Amino acid sequence: MDSEDKLNGEKARSEELSGKVAQLNRLAFSTIITAVLRFGIRIVKNIATTRLLGPVARGDFGLLTTIPGIVVSFGNIGFGLGSMYLIAGRKYDRKRAVASTIVFTLLLSILLMAVTWFVLDVGKYYKPPGNSLRIYLPFVIASVFFVMSEKTGVDLLTATKNIGFLNSMELLYSSLPLVVLVVLWLITGDALSSALYGWLLGTALLGIWSMAKVVQPGTSPLDVSLSYVRDALSYGARGYVSICADDVVRRIDYLFVAAINGSQALGYYAVSVSVAEILLAMPEAVSKPFLPIRFEMEGERGKEFSSLVVRHMLAIMLIPCTVVAIGGKLMIWILFGKAFFPAYVSMACLLPGVLALSVTNILKTDFYSLNQPGMVSKVSIYAMILNLALNFLLIPRYGIVGAAVASSLSYDFTAVFLLVRLTRITGTRYGDFLFIKREEIAAIWRKIIKLIASSSSSSSSA
């Protein structure tokens, strides 16, 4: 009887795992289609922006759009993470949870605007070479409000599994800045201002429309749950350090390069980073629907699901990273022109980090689902300290190549640390995370053959 119960349990676990994989495939498929479209749009947008701006203004654009993101990451105090955990896990009534999230984050964004004004204008604590930050300071302060709105809207759509709508909005978010850039540039001839206001308009639209989508009829701004806010802050505070530290690792290099090497070098580095971010479109497409699905799973089912997604993602991402490493210089020449050849080496140095980043969010979600956000914060602090030390040592000596090496080593460290800790906690083998199984390769191959045969039969019948 015990063996029969065990067999039935394994069968139920296998069926649930298959069901969750199918659910992830459905949600991720539309997201991947969106990612492919965004890939094309982002390439066109990056080409237009980079060619119109040139190295110096491209560096200014990267700096001015990076600062609001850093402010929001530090000022969010983990509330966004806590909100996603409570809403996705259905810990509170969705109507009150959404209302509480929106009201709290909008009030917080106003406070962060005041802090930004004090730090950059009153205190003048950050003064990179050139006048771009002084000229566009009102833009940077206003951007804080809209970046916070955009982050809140994306978090809410993810937590409520509105993945299809989020995909549509992100397509608009990718394409609108390009349209605005071209139109404003034709009217004014000022490429930098046109690019900045195109970016701001896309950010504002994504944030406001996304929040409006998840608000249910009859919701009142006064329908705020203080206990929800408290619980979201309590959970999020344990992961807050991780959010801040991760953002330091991903963005602080911009500030270092701008302060030490100037706008032209930052323009080259911005091109390297933009290529890396395009490659990460696929992992982001999977990690968004993965989060709410993983939060619903427990025990062995969750462990098997996570390891399956990680090993497939690594195998897939190894291909584009290798292609870019080999043909990156030709790609830069075709897309951005010979003026941006200095970006190639730093771009190649970022690729190992891109491979690590492709699975980092999935590994972090595993710790969140195990109610261990503190572990994520711990590794993020270690990675931040490593990154800051490497930036101090490498950027003054090696410029943007040093920045890329510092970032890549920090990303690799994070992924390896999380993987080692996760295998120890869950008892999962390293091979289950790193290598696709033989039967999975065979299944994928059969699907490819079936797809080719189906396409051939359709063509012949036509």
Image: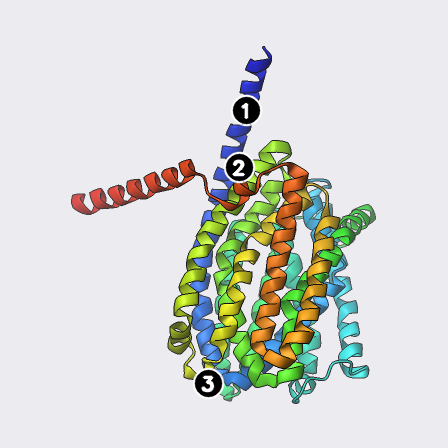
Question: Residue 10 bears which disc, if any?
Answer: 1
Image disc number at residue 186: 3
Q: Residue type at mark 2?
A: Lys
- Picture disc at residue 130: none
Q: Is residue 27 above or below residue 202?
A: above
Q: CA distance from mark 3 to mark 1?
A: 64 Å
Tell me where residue 324 appears, x and y as whole percent. 43, 66
Does any portion of residue 124 appear in the rendered image? yes
Q: Which mark is residue 20?
A: 2
Q: Please tell me which of labels 3 and 2 falls first in the chain.
A: 2
Residue at figure coordinates x 63%, y 57% from the top left? 413
Which residue type carries mark 3?
A: Leu
User: Can you see residue 176?
Assistant: no
Q: Is residue 82 left or right of residue 196?
A: right
Between discs 1 and 2, the one toward the N terminus = 1
* Label 3 or label 1, whichever comes before in sequence order: 1
Q: Crowdedness of circle 2 by 10 Å Cα count: few (<14), some, many (20+)? A: many
Asked whether the beta carbons under mark 3 and mark 2 sit within 8 Å of each other, the answer is no
The quarter of the displayed image where residue 57 is located? bottom right
Q: Is residue 404 above or below residue 224?
A: below
| Element at label 1 | helix
Which label lies toward us, 1 or 2?
Answer: 1
Of 352 and 51, the residue lying toward us: 352
Q: CA–CA distance between discs 1 and 2?
A: 15 Å
Residue at screen point 48% across, 44% down: 435
Residue type of the residue flagged with mark 1: Glu
